[in-house]
Amino acid sequence: MPDRPGAVLVLGASRGLGRAIAVAGAEAGFAVVLGCREVATGEPTAARLRARGLRASAIGVDVTNYDAVAAAVEHAVAFGAPLVGIVNNAGIIGPLAPIEATAPDAWSQAISVNLVGAYHGTRAALPRLADGGVIVNLSSGAASQPLAGWSAYCAAKAGLAMLTRCTHAEHGERLRVYGARPGMLDTDMQAEVRASGLGPASRIAQRSLGAPSVAARAVAWLLGVAPEDLSGTEIELDSVALQLRMGPLPGGAA
Ligand SMILES: NC(=O)c1ccc[n+]([C@@H]2O[C@H](COP(=O)([O-])OP(=O)(O)OC[C@H]3O[C@@H](n4cnc5c(N)ncnc54)[C@H](OP(=O)(O)O)[C@@H]3O)[C@@H](O)[C@H]2O)c1
């Protein structure tokens, strides 16, 4: 992993994949800002990283609030300028129900968090990102695969994939932007999927889900290497092709 000093803002870093990305990013040498709805949910992770001599800070930010997202970007710039990356990770899976059974407010909230939240992160970061900076949008197979009972999530992630492409079309000369598909991970989100009892995805055993730390390492790689040829595309983080390209873990582990 090349040494690219600078700040990375991770939105939705309180738990699950976002927290793992913050840890992997700090271990890769970035000054990481954990953007969490409640700052108290990010501060313990930031404190543990600082105790290891790594650079980390937490800030309270709800991604549905543009002013809060813009303030988090400014915090990241002040904390570890230049800003070299933003990770639009905040997400919610629900409402999980057939369309006619969904509450309109809940459906709208899913779009607000999963799609508008990533737009907010992109909108606020674009004027502040250094040349060669990286935007990672946490995507999903649901962006291109319709799943019964998942309409809000699928629609939001499909929109997010187009936002990735549009951002690349506008800024691909100067920046890199990736739609990162992490595979099915053992996080609270998958616990919600299992509890829903909806479709085959709810019957996937917890033991067969991937570790957030593995996907997080791939996101840190994207932030560090910023591969030009992958910008504007959807990337399967658990693909053999990407793992081969990333190479072995430091220390020789698989
Ligand atoms: N897990 C999977 O199998 C999987 C597969 C494909 C894609 N993904 C994507 O990966 C990302 C992370 O998923 P995960 O599995 O780690 O989910 P998770 O365990 O449910 O965590 C979701 C994170 O998003 C945050 N969040 C939710 N609403 C927010 C808001 N309005 N403002 C700020 N933060 C907010 C949560 O904060 P709080 O703690 O405050 O709620 C939490 O940190 C999501 O974008 C998801 O769609 C996950």
Image (tube, rainbow, N blue to C red):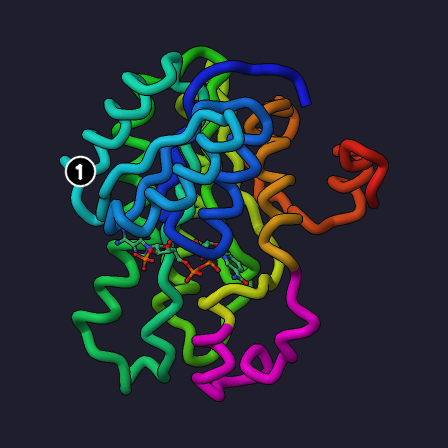
Quick one: which residue is furthest to the front in this view?
51
Give the percent coordinates (x, y) of residue 97: 36, 82
Q: Of 139 and 7, which appears nearest the observer?
A: 7
Question: Which residue corresponds to the image point at 74% horizontal and 40% vertical from the top-left?
Answer: 242
What is the three-letter code of the residue carrying label 1?
Ala
Residue 59, percent across and down? 26, 37
Q: Quadrant of residue 252?
A: top right
**91 and 36: which is toward the camera:** 36
Image quarter of the C terminus: top right
Q: Nearer the viewer, residue 80 or 231?
A: 80
Q: Quadrant of residue 166?
A: top left
Q: Quadrant of the N terminus?
A: top right
**Quadrant of res 167:** top left
Q: Left or right of 226: which side holds 12?
A: left
SS at mark 1?
A: helix
The magenta stretch is 191-210
* 217 in magenta: no
Is residue 250 placed above or below 29 in the rendered structure? Answer: below
* Image x and y of residue 220, in percent: 58, 34
**Residue 63 shows up from this direction:** no
Q: Which residue is mark 1?
A: 68
Main SS of the magenta part reads helix
Q: Is residue 195 magenta?
A: yes
Q: Is residue 242 left or right of residue 140?
A: right
Residue occupying the point 66% across, 61% down: 210
